Amino acid sequence: MIFLTSSSSRVQVRAAVQSRRLGHVFAPVWRTASGALFGFRAIMRFPDGTGPSAAAAAAREAGDLAALGELSLLSAMRVSWSLSGGLIVDVWPTEDFLCRVPQATALRKTTDVLAELAITAEVSAGALRHTATHLREQGFALALAGEDTAALCDAAETLRPEVLRLQAPLREGPEATALLSAARKLGALVLGDGVDRPGQVAELRLLGCDLVEGPHLGRPAPAGVWTPARVSLSWPREASL
């Protein structure tokens, strides 16, 4: 997928990288078998509305992709210290990715964090291997996502992630079957994303998804908004087990 980046996006990304300041919002991720909270996904937030995919494209053009990935990971860990459960953060594979976690200030254990790596045409095997190895050395768990199921399953067999994301376009047909089979073989959890209407939680549970997320299950909000009461209201009544 190709994203056209605006000058505004490039300015926002460069300002974030240089200032080391980056905002995030968080969306809940749920366990389908019990309806219990698994944790939260961290989503970058820029003042001009630039989304994570556009930000990554702008950072790639400017040579700042590794720096943006490190900044997103560390910033999300700091801001989310009060949130329950695990944390899922997008990290873009690059051959120069480097992240040193300042344990005294991170406030969240790396073992509670899943760094999600996107398998795309722009990602080389070397970049994926380097980034995954570095993250493992720092104590992070791994999640993998991608729209090319064959490439995703091949990467999963090598990297052995804790979570595989089943994106909405891949829910039907042989792609979903292949991904679910690969996950079961590896002992990985399957995360079904994009739940946007009633009834989809039951459908994804029957399909074999262990985790679910999406706007119907809680829209992204700043960390401070996610009080226990807000979290409990986010899981829809129609999805209760």
Image (cartoon, grey):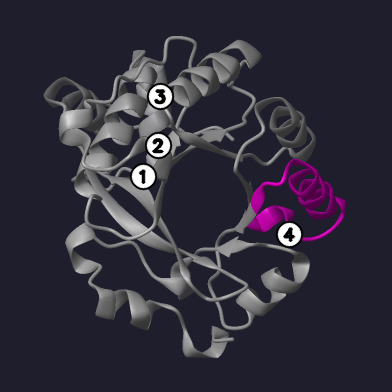
What label does residue 51 carry, if any?
1
Mark 1 or 3, nearer chain start: 1
Q: Position of residue 227 (x, y in %)?
A: 22, 72
Q: Between 156 and 8, which is closer to the camera in this rendering? A: 156
Q: Position of residue 85 (x, y in %)?
A: 38, 58
Q: Residue at x 20, y 67 (%)?
A: 225
Mark 3 or 4, nearer chain start: 3
Cα separation, mark 2 vs mark 1, equals 5 Å
Cα separation, mark 4 vs mark 2, equals 25 Å
| Helix, strand or loop for disc 3 | loop
Crowd tier of the residue under label 2, counting other residues whose Cα lies within 10 Å: few below 14, some 14–19, many 20 or above: some
Q: Which residue is mark 3?
A: 138
Q: Amino acid at mark 3?
A: Gln
Q: Amino acid at mark 1?
A: Gly
Q: Quadrant of the N terminus?
A: top right
Q: Amino acid at mark 2?
A: Ala
Cα separation, mark 2 vs mark 3, equals 27 Å
Mark 2 or 3, nearer chain start: 2
Which range is magenta?
167-189
Q: Which residue is mark 2?
A: 54
Question: Is 4 within the magenta?
Answer: no
Q: Amino acid at mark 4?
A: Arg
Q: Position of residue 15 (x, y in %)?
A: 16, 26
Q: Which residue is mark 4?
A: 171
| Helix, strand or loop for disc 1 | loop
Asked whether the residues under the numbered discs 1 and 4 touch, taking CB atoms below 8 Å apart as contact, a structural biologist would say no
Q: Residue at x 71, y 25 (%)?
A: 158
